[in-house]
């Protein structure tokens, strides 16, 4: 079977790696390793430019509409000055003092909003790891570029091989790679191995000394401030883990599968938040939401994940939905897309049916689970739960970057949540969950210059967030074109 006819799961593993023998260019070619095929592209198919910035000095967005991310009504006719990496000033157009060397960007018809924050994703491979989703060195760089291209300026890697995630975060911070700023969770804390080799820390018994030592390692070696618990961890072990984490000024976010959103476990263990709004074996209620709100437990919504597990997006938009979608087509390698379009998505749905079967069994179908998650979003928002947005990329057809826009559209068009409230969840509320709201997540003077500037008005039409004109990260204007077609050695 050629690389262009691979099933999606294999196609996501069919990635470029370092140290390959020379390939003959002229067309995309395939090198077959002992594990899986590796696709190499002709240089003419790649972007000749390196990923970079269009401008790194002071910038003035002139006469632009501003959505602050904190739920306030859009402010018309504003100037936004970015200088020294930060939002320097905001005010009515023509009223700001600006540096002589400022770059002026006309904002008429545009909306400036905070850069998006993906509060649930896994760089390079997801939780199944190994060859399953292709954790090879350069694929991680594609993920980062795809996020930034879509206006995601900060992301939370919520469980991974710690060295991989920490290296990515530190290389980005040092300016060696382009991409969003990263927060990382490090390893998965669990009582049985579920993820990739190297991504688990097993906690077999509720031993506070042992658990504390593992937390110390995550904090001192990798700089982790919020760790991830997973799968079948017992309430007894989780209670000790949370207490030990809190004693170290660390927090705990959990994916408890069918127990996600369970307010009684939250109250018993004092975990800080749930990593999903999905997979619950019991339909959550307004009373559940009120109990979570009273406990101060946050939830990260990954409704878009159920588009894969239920096949909903395929049913709604058809297999060709990636065509004409620049947030996918401009940054995803063609062999991914061809595999997807030629039936790989359907094959992957069959493959991942085993996951939903393991989690939900015959209790609830994937369609019912998706509908339940859609309804739960509105219930939580209406009852005061702190809810953020994430995607759980890299599952097949959960696209880095693009899926944040899809998640927001589901919130507005299916959950019935107002666009401004949805934008708040994707920006400021996510920043609050990650404890970075003193740095980013809203448009206020003094915060980092992380902005998404789009054509149209997302406060009226949430899909306008896709009409990206500019992305700023740390005050620098991203050259978005330079982020495209970068699937090279």
Image (cartoon, rainbow, N blue to C red):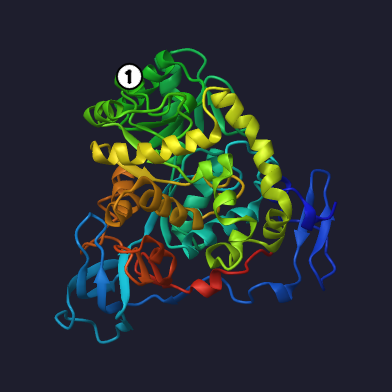
188 to the left or right of 421: right
Whether residue 186 is visible, yes or no, is no
Q: Quadrant of residue 384?
A: top left
Residue positioned 40% across, 16% down in the render: 208
Identify the image quadrant of the C terminus: bottom right
Residue positioned 37% across, 18% down in the render: 239
- Pinpoint residue 440: horizontal percent, then vertical percent: 30, 56
Q: Which element is circle 1 on?
A: helix
Residue positioned 41% across, 41% down in the render: 374
- Pinpoint residue 71: horizontal percent, then vertical percent: 22, 55
Residue 16 vertical placement versus 291 (above, below): below
Residue 410 vertical placement versus 111 (above, below): above
326 to the left or right of 382: right
- Seen from the viewer's position, the closer of residues 341 and 390 is 341
* Residue furthest bottom in the image: 100
Residue positioned 28% across, 78% down in the render: 60
- Pinpoint residue 163: horizontal percent, then vertical percent: 55, 42
Residue tagged by mark 1?
A: 264
Whether residue 405 is visible, yes or no, is yes
Residue 334 vertical placement versus 119 (above, below): below
Residue 247 vertical placement versus 220 (above, below): above
Label 1: how many residues lie within 10 Å, few (<14), some (14-19) or many (20+)?
A: some
- Seen from the viewer's position, the closer of residues 464 and 50 is 464
- Pinpoint residue 299: horizontal percent, then vertical percent: 35, 36
């Amino acid at each position: 079977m050629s690389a262009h006819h691979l099933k999606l799961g294999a196609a996501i593993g069919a990635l470029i790696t370092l140290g390959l023998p020379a390939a003959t260019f002229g067309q995309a070619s395939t090198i077959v390793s002992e594990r899986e095929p590796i696709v190499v592209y002709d240089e003419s198919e790649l972007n000749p430019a390196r990923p970079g910035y269009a401008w790194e000095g002071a910038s003035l967005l002139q006469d632009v509409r501003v959505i602050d991310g904190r739920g306030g009504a859009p402010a018309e006719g504003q100037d936004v000055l970015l200088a020294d990496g930060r939002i320097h000033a905001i005010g009515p157009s023509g009223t700001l003092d600006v540096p002589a060397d400022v770059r002026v960007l006309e904002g008429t018809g545009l909306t400036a909003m905070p850069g998006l924050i993906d509060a649930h994703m896994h760089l390079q491979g997801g939780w199944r790891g190994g060859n399953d989703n292709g954790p090879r060195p350069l694929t991680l760089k594609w993920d980062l570029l795809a996020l930034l291209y879509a206006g995601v300026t900060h992301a939370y890697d919520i469980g991974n091989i710690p060295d991989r995630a920490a290296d990515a975060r530190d290389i980005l911070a040092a300016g060696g790679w382009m991409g969003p700023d990263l927060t990382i969770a490090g390893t998965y804390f669990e009582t049985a191995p579920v993820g990739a080799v190297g991504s688990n820390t097993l906690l077999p018994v509720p031993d506070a000394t042992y658990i504390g030592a593992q937390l110390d390692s995550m904090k001192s070696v990798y700089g982790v401030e919020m760790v991830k618990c997973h799968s079948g961890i017992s309430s007894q072990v989780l209670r000790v883990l949370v207490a030990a984490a809190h004693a170290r000024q660390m927090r705990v976010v959990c994916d408890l599968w069918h127990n996600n959103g369970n307010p009684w476990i939250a109250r018993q263990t004092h975990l800080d938040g749930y990593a999903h709004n999905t997979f619950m074996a019991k339909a959550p209620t307004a009373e559940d939401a009120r109990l979570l709100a009273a406990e101060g437990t946050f939830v990260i919504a990954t409704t878009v994940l159920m588009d894969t597990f239920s096949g909903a997006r395929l049913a709604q938009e058809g297999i060709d939905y990636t065509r004409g979608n620049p947030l996918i087509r401009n940054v995803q390698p063609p062999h991914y897309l061809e595999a997807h379009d030629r039936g790989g998505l359907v094959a992957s749905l069959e493959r991942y049916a085993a996951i939903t079967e393991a989690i939900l069994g015959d209790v609830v179908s994937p369609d019912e689970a998706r509908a339940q998650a859609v309804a739960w979003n509105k219930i939580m928002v209406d009852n005061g739960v702190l809810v953020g947005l994430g995607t759980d990329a890299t599952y097949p057809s959960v696209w880095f970057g693009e899926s944040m826009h899809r998640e927001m559209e589901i919130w507005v068009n299916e959950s019935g949540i107002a666009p401004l409230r949805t934008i708040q969840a994707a920006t400021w509320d996510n920043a609050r969950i990650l404890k970075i709201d003193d740095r980013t997540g809203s448009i206020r003077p003094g915060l980092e210059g992380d902005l998404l500037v789009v054509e149209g008005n997302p406060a009226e039409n949430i899909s306008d967030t896709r009409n990206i004109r500019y992305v700023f990260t740390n005050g620098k204007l991203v050259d978005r074109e330079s982020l495209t077609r970068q699937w090279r050695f």
